[in-house]
Amino acid sequence: MRAGVALIHVPYRGNGPAFNDLIGGQVQVMFASPVGLLEYIQAGKLRALGVTTATRSEALADLPTVGDFVPGYEASFWFGVGAPKATQAQIVEKLNTEINAALADPKMKARLAEWGATALPGSPADFGKLIVEETEKWGKVVKFAGIKPE
């Protein structure tokens, strides 16, 4: 949408078949997380063009971001931890403290880096803000592309 490039979406039942077709030359480009692809990129079997995150990846430090060429572009996936709405504030705070401590641990950071991932510690308010921002951003994409539920 931002680059004005028309691509054809080819649906796959999982990354495995998609990786096979990419490596085999049946598809020419793929947007995927580095998990499972790093070894192919590092071995020279796949040519990475860029990372879709806002900043460069530690695992692929020489690789530019797509945003370097398409201003404002950022697309990344993330995971978060949630709790039921009625969870007591002190429990939420304790969970947040412990999770942030785990994410700051050098062993955890190293393990995430092996997968091409980065930790995004923060507060429950930070996470709520991220959800709102991501919902707004991807809502625009859905509307622009005319995506409808099946």
Image: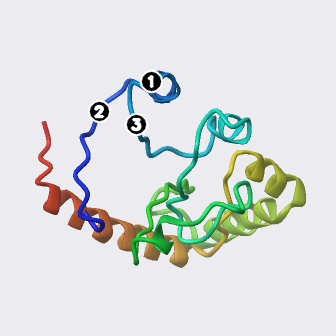
Secondary structure beneath dot 3 equals loop
Residue bearing mark 2:
10
Work out whether mark 1 precedes mark 3 in sequence or the reverse, and give the earlier one.
1
Q: Which image quadrant: the C terminus?
A: top left
Helix, strand or loop at label 1? It is helix
CB contact under 8 Å: marks 2 and 3? no
Q: Nearer the viewer, residue 11 or 106?
A: 11
Q: Position of residue 147 (x, y in %)?
A: 15, 49
Confirm or deny contact between disc 2 and disc 1 (CB under 8 A). yes
Q: Can you tell which of label 2 and label 1 is closer to the viewer?
A: 1
Q: Is residue 61 left or right of residue 149?
A: right
Q: Is residue 134 left or right of residue 78?
A: left
Closer to the eye: label 2 or 3: 3
Identified by mark 2, the residue type is: Val
The CA distance from mark 2 to mark 1 is 11 Å
Of callouts 2 and 3, the N-terminal one:
2
The answer to which of 47 and 76 lies nearer the viewer is 47
Amino acid type for the residue under numbered disc 3: Gln
Identify the residue under disc 1.
Answer: 21
Q: Amino acid at mark 1?
A: Asp
Image quadrant assignment for residue 46: top right
Q: Residues within 10 Å of mark 1 (few under 14, many from 20)?
A: some
Distance between mark 2 and mark 3 Cα atoms: 11 Å
Mark 2 residue element: loop
Q: How many marks?
A: 3
Residue 130 in picture, x, y percent from top left: 46, 71
Q: Residues within 10 Å of mark 3 (few under 14, many from 20)?
A: few
- Give how far across and how far down residue 135 sits, in percent: 32, 65
- Give coordinates of residue 94: x percent, y percent: 71, 67
Which residue occupies the foreground of this view, 17 or 43? 43
Residue at the disc numbered 3? 28
